[in-house]
Image: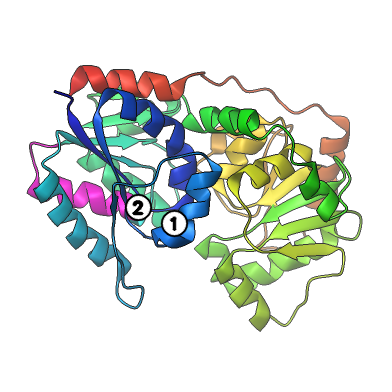
Protein backbone atom coordinates (compact mmCIF):
# COMPACT_ATOMS: atom_id res chain seq x y z
CA UNK A 1 0.00 0.00 0.00
CA UNK A 2 1.28 3.46 -0.90
CA UNK A 3 2.12 5.86 1.94
CA UNK A 4 -0.33 8.75 2.27
CA UNK A 5 0.88 12.34 2.17
CA UNK A 6 -0.85 15.70 2.16
CA UNK A 7 0.70 18.38 -0.04
CA UNK A 8 -0.63 21.75 1.10
CA UNK A 9 -0.58 24.88 -1.10
CA UNK A 10 -2.40 28.17 -1.02
CA UNK A 11 -0.70 30.73 -3.25
CA UNK A 12 0.26 31.11 -6.90
CA UNK A 13 4.05 31.11 -6.22
CA UNK A 14 3.72 27.82 -4.31
CA UNK A 15 1.74 26.32 -7.17
CA UNK A 16 4.38 27.38 -9.68
CA UNK A 17 7.30 25.95 -7.73
CA UNK A 18 5.52 22.80 -6.61
CA UNK A 19 3.75 21.54 -9.74
CA UNK A 20 6.73 19.50 -11.03
CA UNK A 21 7.21 18.01 -7.54
CA UNK A 22 3.51 17.14 -7.21
CA UNK A 23 3.62 15.30 -10.53
CA UNK A 24 6.49 13.17 -9.21
CA UNK A 25 4.86 12.61 -5.79
CA UNK A 26 1.64 11.41 -7.45
CA UNK A 27 3.56 8.48 -8.97
CA UNK A 28 5.02 7.28 -5.67
CA UNK A 29 2.43 8.10 -3.00
CA UNK A 30 -1.24 8.40 -2.23
CA UNK A 31 -0.79 12.15 -2.53
CA UNK A 32 -3.75 14.29 -1.49
CA UNK A 33 -3.38 17.81 -2.84
CA UNK A 34 -4.89 20.45 -0.54
CA UNK A 35 -5.60 24.01 -1.73
CA UNK A 36 -5.91 26.33 1.26
CA UNK A 37 -7.44 29.26 -0.59
CA UNK A 38 -5.08 31.70 1.13
CA UNK A 39 -5.03 34.04 -1.86
CA UNK A 40 -7.88 32.79 -4.04
CA UNK A 41 -10.51 30.12 -3.94
CA UNK A 42 -10.03 27.35 -6.49
CA UNK A 43 -12.54 28.80 -8.95
CA UNK A 44 -10.35 31.90 -9.27
CA UNK A 45 -7.04 30.04 -9.46
CA UNK A 46 -8.23 27.19 -11.72
CA UNK A 47 -6.71 28.82 -14.81
CA UNK A 48 -3.30 28.74 -13.11
CA UNK A 49 -3.64 24.99 -12.51
CA UNK A 50 -4.60 24.55 -16.16
CA UNK A 51 -1.74 26.75 -17.31
CA UNK A 52 0.90 24.51 -15.69
CA UNK A 53 -1.05 21.34 -16.57
CA UNK A 54 -1.59 20.34 -12.95
CA UNK A 55 -4.54 18.22 -11.82
CA UNK A 56 -7.18 19.82 -9.63
CA UNK A 57 -6.83 19.61 -5.82
CA UNK A 58 -8.35 16.71 -3.88
CA UNK A 59 -9.38 19.03 -1.05
CA UNK A 60 -10.31 22.71 -1.34
CA UNK A 61 -10.75 24.86 1.76
CA UNK A 62 -13.59 27.37 1.82
CA UNK A 63 -12.29 30.60 3.32
CA UNK A 64 -14.32 33.62 4.41
CA UNK A 65 -12.13 36.54 3.31
CA UNK A 66 -13.94 38.88 5.70
CA UNK A 67 -12.44 37.02 8.66
CA UNK A 68 -8.85 36.26 9.64
CA UNK A 69 -7.59 33.93 6.89
CA UNK A 70 -4.62 32.58 8.86
CA UNK A 71 -6.68 31.27 11.76
CA UNK A 72 -9.30 29.81 9.42
CA UNK A 73 -6.60 27.90 7.52
CA UNK A 74 -5.18 26.53 10.78
CA UNK A 75 -8.55 25.32 12.00
CA UNK A 76 -9.55 23.72 8.71
CA UNK A 77 -6.16 22.03 8.29
CA UNK A 78 -6.50 20.54 11.77
CA UNK A 79 -9.69 18.70 10.81
CA UNK A 80 -8.30 17.65 7.41
CA UNK A 81 -5.18 16.11 8.97
CA UNK A 82 -7.30 14.48 11.66
CA UNK A 83 -9.54 12.87 9.03
CA UNK A 84 -6.90 11.95 6.44
CA UNK A 85 -4.35 10.48 8.91
CA UNK A 86 -1.37 11.02 6.57
CA UNK A 87 2.12 9.64 7.10
CA UNK A 88 3.55 13.03 6.17
CA UNK A 89 2.53 16.54 5.22
CA UNK A 90 4.44 18.74 2.78
CA UNK A 91 4.47 22.52 2.65
CA UNK A 92 6.55 25.01 0.72
CA UNK A 93 8.40 28.25 1.31
CA UNK A 94 7.23 31.11 3.48
CA UNK A 95 3.48 31.69 3.22
CA UNK A 96 0.73 31.83 5.84
CA UNK A 97 -0.39 28.43 4.55
CA UNK A 98 3.09 27.01 5.25
CA UNK A 99 3.15 28.54 8.71
CA UNK A 100 -0.36 27.28 9.51
CA UNK A 101 0.46 23.75 8.32
CA UNK A 102 3.71 23.56 10.32
CA UNK A 103 2.12 24.92 13.50
CA UNK A 104 -0.97 22.70 13.45
CA UNK A 105 0.91 19.53 12.57
CA UNK A 106 3.62 20.15 15.15
CA UNK A 107 1.31 20.74 18.09
CA UNK A 108 -1.47 18.26 17.33
CA UNK A 109 0.01 15.55 15.09
CA UNK A 110 3.41 14.77 16.52
CA UNK A 111 3.82 11.45 14.67
CA UNK A 112 3.13 12.93 11.23
CA UNK A 113 6.34 13.76 9.37
CA UNK A 114 6.54 17.47 8.63
CA UNK A 115 8.39 18.25 5.39
CA UNK A 116 9.42 21.78 4.42
CA UNK A 117 10.43 22.32 0.80
CA UNK A 118 12.61 25.35 0.13
CA UNK A 119 13.62 25.95 3.72
CA UNK A 120 16.67 27.81 4.95
CA UNK A 121 16.30 31.00 2.92
CA UNK A 122 17.15 34.09 4.97
CA UNK A 123 16.90 37.77 4.05
CA UNK A 124 17.93 38.76 7.61
CA UNK A 125 15.03 41.22 7.62
CA UNK A 126 12.68 40.36 10.48
CA UNK A 127 10.27 43.06 9.30
CA UNK A 128 9.32 40.79 6.40
CA UNK A 129 6.39 38.55 7.24
CA UNK A 130 7.88 35.92 4.93
CA UNK A 131 11.13 35.88 6.92
CA UNK A 132 9.30 35.21 10.18
CA UNK A 133 7.26 32.44 8.51
CA UNK A 134 10.45 30.82 7.17
CA UNK A 135 12.15 30.88 10.55
CA UNK A 136 9.21 29.35 12.40
CA UNK A 137 8.38 26.68 9.82
CA UNK A 138 11.98 25.50 9.67
CA UNK A 139 12.13 25.11 13.44
CA UNK A 140 8.97 22.97 13.41
CA UNK A 141 9.88 20.68 10.52
CA UNK A 142 11.33 17.16 10.66
CA UNK A 143 12.73 17.15 7.12
CA UNK A 144 13.93 20.22 5.21
CA UNK A 145 14.86 20.48 1.54
CA UNK A 146 17.13 23.40 0.67
CA UNK A 147 18.42 24.76 -2.61
CA UNK A 148 22.11 25.24 -1.77
CA UNK A 149 24.74 24.65 0.90
CA UNK A 150 24.29 28.24 2.08
CA UNK A 151 20.71 27.50 3.20
CA UNK A 152 21.93 24.39 5.01
CA UNK A 153 24.52 26.51 6.80
CA UNK A 154 21.78 28.98 7.80
CA UNK A 155 19.84 26.15 9.43
CA UNK A 156 22.88 24.72 11.21
CA UNK A 157 23.55 28.18 12.73
CA UNK A 158 20.00 28.02 14.10
CA UNK A 159 20.72 24.62 15.66
CA UNK A 160 18.82 22.63 13.04
CA UNK A 161 21.27 19.89 12.14
CA UNK A 162 19.39 16.76 11.07
CA UNK A 163 17.53 15.71 7.94
CA UNK A 164 18.58 18.66 5.76
CA UNK A 165 18.88 17.80 2.07
CA UNK A 166 20.53 20.04 -0.53
CA UNK A 167 18.52 19.34 -3.69
CA UNK A 168 18.57 22.47 -5.82
CA UNK A 169 15.63 24.67 -6.76
CA UNK A 170 12.43 23.25 -8.25
CA UNK A 171 11.83 26.54 -10.09
CA UNK A 172 14.43 25.30 -12.61
CA UNK A 173 12.17 22.31 -13.34
CA UNK A 174 9.14 24.63 -13.54
CA UNK A 175 10.77 26.93 -16.11
CA UNK A 176 12.04 23.98 -18.17
CA UNK A 177 8.60 22.34 -18.24
CA UNK A 178 6.80 25.56 -19.15
CA UNK A 179 9.24 26.24 -21.99
CA UNK A 180 8.52 22.75 -23.35
CA UNK A 181 4.74 23.20 -23.09
CA UNK A 182 4.65 26.71 -24.53
CA UNK A 183 7.37 27.01 -27.14
CA UNK A 184 5.99 30.18 -28.66
CA UNK A 185 3.75 32.93 -27.35
CA UNK A 186 4.45 35.56 -30.02
CA UNK A 187 0.87 36.74 -29.84
CA UNK A 188 1.65 38.21 -26.43
CA UNK A 189 4.52 40.29 -27.84
CA UNK A 190 2.47 41.34 -30.84
CA UNK A 191 -0.58 42.23 -28.76
CA UNK A 192 1.32 44.96 -26.93
CA UNK A 193 3.62 45.88 -29.83
CA UNK A 194 6.75 44.96 -27.88
CA UNK A 195 10.21 44.63 -29.38
CA UNK A 196 12.38 41.69 -28.39
CA UNK A 197 15.00 42.71 -25.79
CA UNK A 198 13.77 46.31 -25.83
CA UNK A 199 11.12 46.47 -23.11
CA UNK A 200 11.15 46.23 -19.32
CA UNK A 201 8.99 43.74 -17.46
CA UNK A 202 7.65 45.14 -14.14
CA UNK A 203 5.84 43.56 -11.19
CA UNK A 204 5.35 45.03 -7.72
CA UNK A 205 3.36 43.37 -4.95
CA UNK A 206 5.23 42.97 -1.63
CA UNK A 207 3.57 44.57 1.40
CA UNK A 208 6.74 46.40 2.52
CA UNK A 209 6.60 48.29 -0.80
CA UNK A 210 2.91 48.57 -1.58
CA UNK A 211 1.76 49.48 1.94
CA UNK A 212 4.48 52.10 2.50
CA UNK A 213 3.47 55.37 0.81
CA UNK A 214 7.00 56.76 0.53
CA UNK A 215 8.37 53.54 -0.95
CA UNK A 216 5.58 53.02 -3.47
CA UNK A 217 5.82 56.67 -4.58
CA UNK A 218 9.55 56.26 -5.22
CA UNK A 219 8.92 52.97 -7.03
CA UNK A 220 6.44 54.68 -9.38
CA UNK A 221 8.99 57.45 -9.95
CA UNK A 222 11.53 54.80 -10.95
CA UNK A 223 9.06 53.10 -13.32
CA UNK A 224 8.24 56.47 -14.89
CA UNK A 225 11.95 57.23 -15.27
CA UNK A 226 12.56 53.87 -16.97
CA UNK A 227 9.65 54.50 -19.34
CA UNK A 228 11.37 57.54 -20.84
CA UNK A 229 13.68 55.25 -22.81
CA UNK A 230 11.85 51.91 -22.82
CA UNK A 231 8.36 50.59 -23.21
CA UNK A 232 7.23 48.94 -20.00
CA UNK A 233 4.73 46.14 -19.50
CA UNK A 234 3.31 46.07 -15.99
CA UNK A 235 0.91 43.21 -15.02
CA UNK A 236 -0.50 44.80 -11.91
CA UNK A 237 -1.46 43.02 -8.71
CA UNK A 238 -5.02 43.94 -7.56
CA UNK A 239 -3.73 45.36 -4.26
CA UNK A 240 -1.08 47.41 -6.04
CA UNK A 241 -3.70 48.70 -8.47
CA UNK A 242 -5.93 49.78 -5.60
CA UNK A 243 -3.08 51.68 -3.93
CA UNK A 244 -1.97 53.23 -7.20
CA UNK A 245 -5.35 54.88 -7.69
CA UNK A 246 -4.88 56.77 -4.41
CA UNK A 247 -1.39 58.10 -5.15
CA UNK A 248 -0.70 61.73 -6.18
CA UNK A 249 1.31 60.47 -9.17
CA UNK A 250 0.31 58.85 -12.45
CA UNK A 251 2.01 56.35 -14.71
CA UNK A 252 3.39 57.72 -17.97
CA UNK A 253 1.92 56.78 -21.34
CA UNK A 254 4.78 54.43 -22.29
CA UNK A 255 3.73 52.07 -19.49
CA UNK A 256 1.33 49.30 -20.48
CA UNK A 257 -0.80 48.36 -17.48
CA UNK A 258 -2.38 44.91 -17.82
CA UNK A 259 -4.33 42.56 -15.53
CA UNK A 260 -2.44 39.67 -13.86
CA UNK A 261 -1.10 37.22 -16.42
CA UNK A 262 -0.51 33.48 -16.42
CA UNK A 263 2.78 31.88 -15.43
CA UNK A 264 3.52 30.77 -18.98
CA UNK A 265 2.94 34.33 -20.23
CA UNK A 266 5.18 35.68 -17.47
CA UNK A 267 8.00 33.30 -18.41
CA UNK A 268 7.66 34.25 -22.07
CA UNK A 269 7.77 38.01 -21.34
CA UNK A 270 10.73 37.52 -19.02
CA UNK A 271 12.60 35.55 -21.68
CA UNK A 272 12.12 38.38 -24.21
CA UNK A 273 12.58 41.50 -22.02
CA UNK A 274 15.63 43.78 -21.70
CA UNK A 275 15.51 43.29 -17.92
CA UNK A 276 12.87 43.10 -15.18
CA UNK A 277 12.14 45.49 -12.34
CA UNK A 278 10.42 43.49 -9.62
CA UNK A 279 10.16 42.70 -5.91
CA UNK A 280 9.04 39.13 -6.72
CA UNK A 281 11.33 36.44 -5.35
CA UNK A 282 10.18 34.06 -8.06
CA UNK A 283 11.04 36.48 -10.87
CA UNK A 284 14.49 37.05 -9.36
CA UNK A 285 15.18 33.33 -9.68
CA UNK A 286 13.50 32.87 -13.06
CA UNK A 287 15.43 35.82 -14.52
CA UNK A 288 18.75 34.16 -13.68
CA UNK A 289 17.62 30.83 -15.15
CA UNK A 290 16.64 32.62 -18.38
CA UNK A 291 19.91 34.63 -18.38
CA UNK A 292 18.11 37.89 -17.72
CA UNK A 293 18.67 40.38 -14.91
CA UNK A 294 16.41 41.86 -12.27
CA UNK A 295 16.55 45.28 -10.60
CA UNK A 296 14.99 44.80 -7.16
CA UNK A 297 13.32 47.62 -5.17
CA UNK A 298 14.04 46.10 -1.76
CA UNK A 299 16.51 46.65 1.06
CA UNK A 300 17.30 42.95 1.28
CA UNK A 301 16.38 39.74 -0.51
CA UNK A 302 16.43 36.07 0.52
CA UNK A 303 17.87 35.45 -2.96
CA UNK A 304 21.14 37.21 -2.18
CA UNK A 305 22.97 34.37 -3.92
CA UNK A 306 22.00 36.00 -7.22
CA UNK A 307 23.18 39.51 -6.32
CA UNK A 308 26.17 40.47 -8.45
CA UNK A 309 27.36 43.42 -10.53
CA UNK A 310 26.55 41.32 -13.61
CA UNK A 311 23.38 39.70 -12.28
CA UNK A 312 20.53 40.90 -10.05
CA UNK A 313 20.93 44.12 -8.08
CA UNK A 314 19.09 45.91 -5.29
CA UNK A 315 18.12 49.54 -5.74
CA UNK A 316 17.92 51.88 -2.76
CA UNK A 317 14.49 53.47 -2.90
CA UNK A 318 14.73 55.21 0.46
CA UNK A 319 16.78 57.86 -1.28
CA UNK A 320 14.82 59.62 -4.03
CA UNK A 321 18.08 60.25 -5.89
CA UNK A 322 18.11 56.94 -7.77
CA UNK A 323 18.87 58.05 -11.34
CA UNK A 324 22.60 57.23 -11.08
CA UNK A 325 21.76 53.71 -9.83
CA UNK A 326 19.44 53.15 -12.79
CA UNK A 327 21.93 54.45 -15.36
CA UNK A 328 24.71 52.27 -13.96
CA UNK A 329 22.48 49.16 -14.01
CA UNK A 330 21.25 49.77 -17.57
CA UNK A 331 24.80 50.32 -18.83
CA UNK A 332 25.87 47.08 -17.18
CA UNK A 333 23.00 45.16 -18.81
CA UNK A 334 23.97 46.58 -22.19
CA UNK A 335 27.71 45.91 -22.12
CA UNK A 336 28.24 42.93 -19.79
CA UNK A 337 27.21 39.32 -20.23
CA UNK A 338 25.00 38.08 -17.38
CA UNK A 339 26.84 36.06 -14.78
CA UNK A 340 26.21 32.32 -15.08
CA UNK A 341 24.96 30.33 -12.11
CA UNK A 342 24.92 26.55 -11.92
CA UNK A 343 21.58 24.90 -11.15
CA UNK A 344 20.88 21.31 -10.22
CA UNK A 345 18.68 19.44 -12.66
CA UNK A 346 15.78 17.11 -11.79
CA UNK A 347 15.24 18.60 -8.33
CA UNK A 348 11.64 17.35 -8.30
CA UNK A 349 12.70 13.77 -9.00
CA UNK A 350 15.36 13.94 -6.27
CA UNK A 351 12.90 15.28 -3.66
CA UNK A 352 10.33 12.57 -4.42
CA UNK A 353 12.97 9.83 -4.17
CA UNK A 354 14.31 11.09 -0.84
CA UNK A 355 10.82 11.32 0.66
CA UNK A 356 10.12 7.80 -0.56
CA UNK A 357 13.13 6.49 1.38
CA UNK A 358 12.55 8.26 4.69
CA UNK A 359 8.82 8.07 5.44
The residue drawn where x is 45% and y is 40% is: 54
Instruction: Please identify the quarter of the rendering in which residue 73 is found.
Output: bottom left
Q: Is residue 133 visible?
A: yes
- In the rendering, at what x and y percent does residue 29 appear? 25, 27
Q: Is residue 307 left or right of residue 72?
A: right
Residue 128 — which label? 1
- In the rendering, at what x and y percent does residue 55 appear? 41, 41
**What is the C-alpha distance between the residues marked 1 and 2?**
7 Å
The residue drawn where x is 73% and y is 35% is: 292
Give the residue at mark 2: 132
Quadrant, the C terminus:
top left
The magenta span reads 97-112
* Disc 1 + disc 2, Cβ < 8 Å: yes
The residue drawn where x is 80% and y is 56% is: 232
- In the rendering, at what x and y percent does residue 119 appear? 36, 36
Quadrant, the N terminus:
top left
Amino acid sequence: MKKKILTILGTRPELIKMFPIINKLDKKFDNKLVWSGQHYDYAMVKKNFNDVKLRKPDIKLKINKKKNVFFQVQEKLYYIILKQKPDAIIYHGDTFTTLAASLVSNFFFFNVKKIHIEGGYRSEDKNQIEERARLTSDQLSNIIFVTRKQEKENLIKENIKKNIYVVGNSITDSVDEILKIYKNKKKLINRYNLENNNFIYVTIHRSENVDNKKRILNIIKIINALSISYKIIFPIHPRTHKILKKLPIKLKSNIILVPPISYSESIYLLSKCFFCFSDSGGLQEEAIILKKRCLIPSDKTPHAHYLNKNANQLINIKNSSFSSQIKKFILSVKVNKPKSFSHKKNTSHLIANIIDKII
